[in-house]
Image: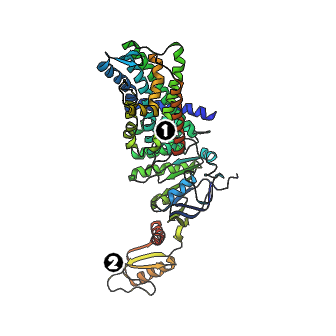
Amino acid sequence: MNTLRLTGVQLRYVNKAFWRNPASAFFTFAFPLMFLVIFTALLGHYTVQLGSRSINTSTYYVASMACFSVITACFNNIAMAVTFQREDAILKRAHGTPLPGAAFLGARILHAASIAIVLVVITAAFGRAVYGADIPTGSTLLRFIVALLVGAAAFCALGLAASAVIPNADAGAPVVNAIILPLEFLSGIFIAFGNNTPSWILWIARVFPVRHFVLSMQAGFLGSTFSWTDVLVVAAWGVAGMLLAIRFFSWEPRQG
Amino acid sequence: MSDDSPAVRVRGLVKSYGAVQAVRGIDLDIRQGEIFALLGPNGAGKTTTVEILEGYRRRDGGEVTVFGYDPGRERAKMLPRVGIVLQKTGIDRYLTVAESVRMYASYYPKPRDPDEVIGLVGLTGKRDSRVTKLSGGQARRLDMAVALAGDPDLLFLDEPTTGFDPSARREAWEVVKNLASLGKTVLLTTHYMDEAQYLADRVAVIAAGQIVAEGSPATIGDRDVAGARIRYRLPDGARPPGGLAGPPDADGFLVITSQDPVRDLHRLTGWAIENGITLDGLEVTRPSLEDVYLSLTGELGAGA
């Protein structure tokens, strides 16, 4: 009970600090919309073939950028922010107070997930208003929300796990980008898979969680096939991330 | 727990990092309400000892209690009663001074009024400033404010003024002095003699993982009973009285070590007046805390 109350109090301060950091607010909020506009401007007149259906590229990118937002808000943000706070000994200081570790990290995870949800709503609203994209409604909405929540939680857990292997604050952004950017490309976020996509790319996409997350989210936007297997794979990766984080997480700076 | 039980009790504490024995059998008793300084050179084991007391590190052996709690096994019970200022710590840079103190206060069951805490460390004029806008000395006082937010009974200060300019050190010292008047117990580590001398009620000198001397800053290392040093210069050709002569030092001063400086000075000055001799630059000194410290840590440092 006390942990829950403290998580709520802590959440307010995490949020305050987040909005006062112009870089993090800009990258998290502006990037997905910026990419949406750029990709649609470049490729918006084409269609993407999903199975037997062809889908307008702009609609495809609305779904893609919604996924991109969730991954950035959860995985990138948590991995970098927690690493920075660890090396700056902010984690160590907090760990020397009665604040439960679960409340400290829980607040950050809840904040990241909330930002992710807000970004998905903004992206969907923007896509609907500007590009007339389809957005999740009716019966698909519920399972879309489940896929979104599972994805947000999983990428938060993976972000925590990543922070445990990032050696210092300077390595934060490079390591995070080195992990996630190739995976995003190899999962069809920026460039849709076609009929000629090489099988090695399909295999990588099948193993890692990004493609499964994209597929589960696309179903809501594009009316493509929804499979609970995708949600389960994302959830399994989230659990693995959580276990790795628990095993390797450190409140103490690696250096100094 | 009765009031005269020690705030901190340590017996036979040992800790190694691999083959390096960082702490080699330390005993300590810190009474409630006193300012206790752990004085020693870098690498002597100060931070290791303090971080074991704070519950950050596990000990290899020995008994440790803080307010009766074992920091290793009962850390959650201990933490509401202590405030920790680490050697190097960050704080969320996008919050203001007042927000930071309020945030940390919210972690504790019985916090002190945040504005009062900010006043206590002399940051009232900066209460709405962002953390990034503070000077090094101000940031250190914010560290203390944050550690005091929960109104702890015991404050750990790990090298509170290392790297500070003299005026910032003075300001930090005044804050620590104020804490004593609130009845707080303070355990501070330092490698500055003047800091220990100015702040501490009791000092323990630590070298190579062991306590080599313990006492008040005035009496540690038997400074108070060690021989006094009498130093003076005679005009050319004058011969000092028997028993009061010593070899001249580089500046031509005669130096004698006296176990009974009152009697010896009386003889010396009586002799000088009777014979109409001036005693240029006459001075009597006790070994300084620095002398004691250097001799204590030097001996062990050389052996280790």
Residue A58 in the image: x percent, y percent?
A: 36, 17
What is the chain identity of the residue bearing mark 1?
Answer: A
Say which quarter of the image contains residue A103. Answer: top right
Circles 1 and 2, Cβ within 8 Å, touching? The answer is no
Circle 2: element type: loop
Amino acid type at circle 1 is Leu
Q: Is residue B150 left or right of residue B121?
A: right
Residue A171 place in picture, x, y as percent:
38, 43
Closer to us: A256 or A241 = A241
* Image quadrant occupied by the N terminus of chain A: top right
Residue A48 or B138: which is nearer the viewer? A48
Which of the 4 image quadrants contains residue A211?
top left
Q: Which mark is residue B250?
A: 2
**Colour setup of the view:** rainbow
In this rendering, would A5 be left or right of B286? Answer: right
Q: Amino acid at mark 2?
A: Ala
Query: Which residue is tagged 1?
Result: A160
- The foreground one among B14 and B264 is B14
Q: Estimate how packed mark 2 is, as few (under 14), some (14 to 19) or many (20 or more) residues with alpha carbons within 10 Å.
A: few
Q: Is residue B226 above or below residue A109?
A: below
- Which residue lies most toward the right here? B2
Which disc, if any, is residue A29?
none
Residue A3, image x, y percentages: 60, 35
State whether residue B137 is above or below residue B61. Answer: above
Eyeballing the image, is A78 above or below B170? above
Residue B128 appears in the figure: no
Give whichever of A225, A44 is nearer the camera: A225
Q: Secondary structure at mark 1?
A: helix
10 Å crowding of disc 1: few (<14), some (14-19), many (20+): many
> Which tag is nearer the camera, tag 1 or tag 2?
1
